[in-house]
Amino acid sequence: MQWSDEPNGGFSTAEAVVRAPVDRGPYAYRHVNVEEQRRDSTSLLQWTARMIRLRKQCPEIGWGEWRIVPTGSRAVLAIEYRWRGSTIICVHNLADEPRETKLDLGVGTLANLVDVEQIEADRGGVHHVVVEPYGYRWFRAGAVTPALARDVAG
């Protein structure tokens, strides 16, 4: 990605460069560059940074045991990660239209890790989760607070 809206995308002050940056169209360096994306809270750069921070806060994904969770939809992938008494569930919709999934996880509450939301299981213990087209939802089973306060030695 270009660094800034300066000539040559901020890569070089030379008059001629070996490979010129994109300078036309919607992805020209004057429109898409790191400097602009850092200022835009809705940019792809900011989203990527948020997701990297979130992933680092979920050691279950790297250290835990995992299993594929049945979703009731061929287009939705759900993976459950368990580590040291904590559980993360990542749900991904691979379709171009919204999908409702049914997750039987054996827990009462799913706390959304991206948005402020909690989903309770129905009377049968099943969570009904709607995921937008090509979307994702990451949850912690149970409340978020106990997972953050857990004993890291245990």
Image (cartoon, rainbow, N blue to C red):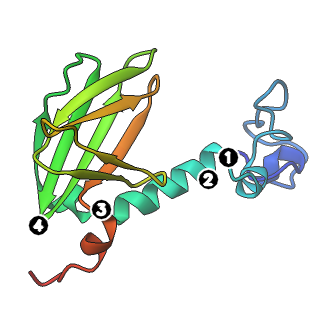
Instruction: Kindly identify the residue that appears in the image at 79 percent across and 42 percent down.
Output: 17
Task: Report the residue marked by disc 1.
Answer: 42
Q: Position of residue 153 (x, y in %)?
A: 12, 84
Residue at label 2? Answer: 46
Q: Residues within 10 Å of mark 1 (few under 14, many from 20)?
A: few
What amino acid is at disc 2? Gln
Query: Which type of secondary structure does the marked residue at label 4 adopt?
Result: loop
Q: What amino acid is found at the position of numbered circle 3 in the picture?
A: Cys
Amino acid on which the number 1 mark rests in the picture: Thr
| Foreground residue among 66 and 111 | 111
**Does residue 142 appear to the left or right of 112 in the view shown?**
left
Q: Which residue is mark 4?
A: 85
Does label 3 or label 2 sit earlier along the sequence?
2
Instruction: Give the structural element (helix, strand or loop) at label 3.
Output: loop
Residue named by callout 3:
58
Q: Secondary structure at mark 1?
A: loop
SS at mark 2 in the image: helix
Residue 59: x percent and y percent? 24, 64
Few, some or many C-alpha atoms within 10 Å of disc 2 (few <14, some 14-19, many ≥20)?
some
In the depicted view, which residue is nearer to us: 114 or 63? 114
Report how far apart the C-alphas of labels 2 and 4 lie in the structure.
31 Å
Looking at the image, residue 85 sits to the left or right of residue 4; the answer is: left
Between marks 2 and 1 in the image, the one whose residue lies nearer the viewer? 1
Q: Is tag 3's residue or tag 1's residue first in the polypeptide sequence? A: 1
Mark 3 and mark 1: Cα distance apart in space: 23 Å
